[in-house]
Amino acid sequence: MGVAAGPIRVVVAKPGLDGHDRGAKVIARALRDAGMEVIYTGLHQTPEQVVDTAIQEDADAIGLSILSGAHNTLFAKVIELLEERDAADIKVFGGGIIPEDDIAPLKAQGVAEIFTPGATTASIVEWVRSNVRHAAEA
C-alpha cells in the first residue's frame, strides 16, 4: 500500500431527527469489512457537524442515511456547506426512504448516488470502490 494512498475514508452520518440507524450501521460495517476507513457520526447530526467531521477526517466521501423525509433539504445543505468550505471534491452519496421522483433532482444538485431500500451492501461497496478515489490514485 502506497504511503499517499491509504484506504478510502468515508463518513457515514444520520443527519436530522431520524432515530433509526441500523441501516447506517450495516453500511458502515460493510465498508469497513471492504477495507475502508469509516467514521460513523452517530444519530442526530446537523449538516454542519457532518461536513466538519468529513473535513477534519480528510474524508473522500460522505454517506448520508435519511429516513425522515427531509432528504431534499439535508443533501442540499451538506453539498452547499462542502462548496463553501472548498471541499466539493468530497463525494456525497446516500440512501434511505427516498422517492423515485426525488432521485434525479438530488443528483442534479450534486448527490453522486442514491441507494434505495432494496440496494445490497455489496452494490454500495462496489459503487464506493468504483467512484470514490483518492486524488493520489487518480
Image (spheres, rainbow, N blue to C red):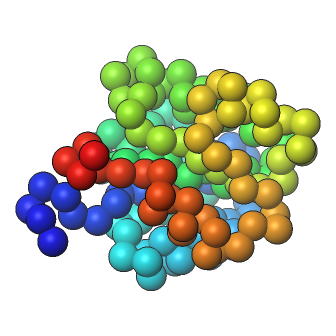
The location of residue 65, given as percent across then percent down, is: 67, 54
Q: Which of 8 and 23 lies nearest the eye of the viewer?
A: 8
Asked if residue 78 is positioned above or below residue 8 in the image, the reply reads: above
Q: Residue at x 56, y 60 (%)?
A: 127
Q: Residue at x 48, y 41 (%)?
A: 91
Number of on-image labels: 0
Question: Image quarter for residue 70?
Answer: top right
Residue at the farthest bottom position = 33
The location of residue 76, given as percent across then percent down, is: 64, 27
Q: Residue at x 69, y 26 (%)?
A: 108
Q: Which of 44 and 123 lies nearest the eye of the viewer?
A: 123
Quadrant assignment for the N terminus? bottom left
Residue 89 in sight from this viewpoint: yes
Question: Image quarter for residue 6?
Answer: bottom left
Q: Is 16 left, or right, of 36 in this rendering?
A: right
The location of residue 116, given as percent across then percent down, is: 79, 57
Q: Which of 39 and 19 lies nearest the eye of the viewer?
A: 39
Asked if residue 41 is positioned above or below residue 52 in the image, the reply reads: below
Residue 46 in sight from this viewpoint: no
Q: Is 88 left, or right, of 120 in this rendering?
A: left
Asked if residue 105 is positioned above or below residue 46 in the image, the reply reads: above
The location of residue 67, given as percent across then percent down, is: 79, 53
Q: Residue at x 42, y 57 (%)?
A: 10
